[in-house]
Image (cartoon, grey):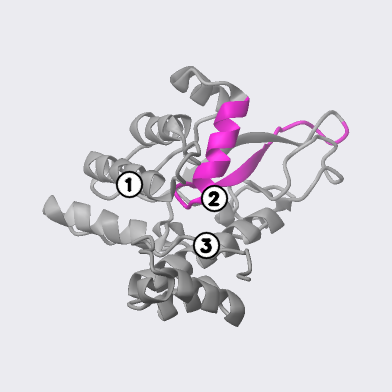
């Protein structure tokens, strides 16, 4: 069916109905579910603060001795999209991978990998899209893949990042009331796992921030594991161990049983 106005929009899942390979969960460019562009409130001021928040977050989650999960290439891709690929007034943002390759001078594989990382942490989202080719039935593919529609849903940001963003904009004298998006028309298994992991991490960070005693920190780190909690408390309490513990309280308990 046509995706033109006045006809029922369609979603394409796989290749069986078109004869042309298209990505799963792709929607016609006229489908209401593909209409994700919103004006970018505060324009360049938002962009600058958003990138500041990204830097703060990537440094917060970096593990000692390991490379940044959100590396410099991720920042390059995000900054390029925000600074060079979006219309602030309309929110139109639909760069192709080829365009991003030209602008960033990164390989296609690197850009795809960075987009996945940015999406996993809530800094960018997109809808895959298709359009009708206009070919007569039986004379070629009826649809073709087109560039993604990119958008920025603040509800997907880690809660701490959203608070940082509002505060940074407030310091610039700007109030921030981001648009609300309806639930995505699809959520794949990988994204569900990513969302679940991020939620658990955010909940743990909040619980540790609120904990005031070794017992409370132990309960947050090892819920339902009394033996591990006990070992953690012994390790974290100088009067019991004779040695000071890490101020962060994040060191795991020793797994070596005492004689």
How crowded is the residue under tag 1: few (<14 C-alpha within 10 Å), some, or many (20+)? few
The image quarter in which residue 55 lies: top left
Point out which mark residue 112 bears: none
Q: Residue at x 36, y 76 (%)?
A: 239
Q: Which residue is mark 1?
A: 56
Residues at discs 2 and 1 in contact (Cβ within 8 Å)? no
Question: Is 232 placed above or below 136 here?
Answer: below
Residue 66 as seen in the image, left or right of residue 157: right
In this rendering, does residue 20 appear at all?
yes
**Among numbered discs 3 and 2, the one appearing first in the sequence:** 2
Q: Whole-percent x and y of residue 182?
A: 50, 64
Q: Secondary structure at mark 3?
A: loop
Per the image, is 125 magenta? yes
Q: Secondary structure at mark 2?
A: helix
Q: Which residues are the magenta region?
A: 109-138
Question: Is 236 placed above or below 181 here?
Answer: below
* Quadrant position of the C terminus in the picture: bottom right
Q: In this view of the protein, which residue sits in the foreground, 204 or 97?
A: 204
Cα gap from disc 1 to disc 3, whole angstroms = 25 Å
Residues at discs 1 and 3 in contact (Cβ within 8 Å)? no
Per the image, is 230 magenta? no
Q: Which residue is mark 3?
A: 252
Q: Residue at x 70, y 53 (%)?
A: 10
In this rendering, does residue 225 appear at all?
no
Q: In this view of the protein, which residue sits in the foreground, 84 or 79?
A: 79
Q: Residue at x 13, y 53 (%)?
A: 171
Q: Secondary structure at mark 1?
A: helix
Cα gap from disc 2 to disc 1, whole angstroms = 16 Å
């Amino acid at each position: 069916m046509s995706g033109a106005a006045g006809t029922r929009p369609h979603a394409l899942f796989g290749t069986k109905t078109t004869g042309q390979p298209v990505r799963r969960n792709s929607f016609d460019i006229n489908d209401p579910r593909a209409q994700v562009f919103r004006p970018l409130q505060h324009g360049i001021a938002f962009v600058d603060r958003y990138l500041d928040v990204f830097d703060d977050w990537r440094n917060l989650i970096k593990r000692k001795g390991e490379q940044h999960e959100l590396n410099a290439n991720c920042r390059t891709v995000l900054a390029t999209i925000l600074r060079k690929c979006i219309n602030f007034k309309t929110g139109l943002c639909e760069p192709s991978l080829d365009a991003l390759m030209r602008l960033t001078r990164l390989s296609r594989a690197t850009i795809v990998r960075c987009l996945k990382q940015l999406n996993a942490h809530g800094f960018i989202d997109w809808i895959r899209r298709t359009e009708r080719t206009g070919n007569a039935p039986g004379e070629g593919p009826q649809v073709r893949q087109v560039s993604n529609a990119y958008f920025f849903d603040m509800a997907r940001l880690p809660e701490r990042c959203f608070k940082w963003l509002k505060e940074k904009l407030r310091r610039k004298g700007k109030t921030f009331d981001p648009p609300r998006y309806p639930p995505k028309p699809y959520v794949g298994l990988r994204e569900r796992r990513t969302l679940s992991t991020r939620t658990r991490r955010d909940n743990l960070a909040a619980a540790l921030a609120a904990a005031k005693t070794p017992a409370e920190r132990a309960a947050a780190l090892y819920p339902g594991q009394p033996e591990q909690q006990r070992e953690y408390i012994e390790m974290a309490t100088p009067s019991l161990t004779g040695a000071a513990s890490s101020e962060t309280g994040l060191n795991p308990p020793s797994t070596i049983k005492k004689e």
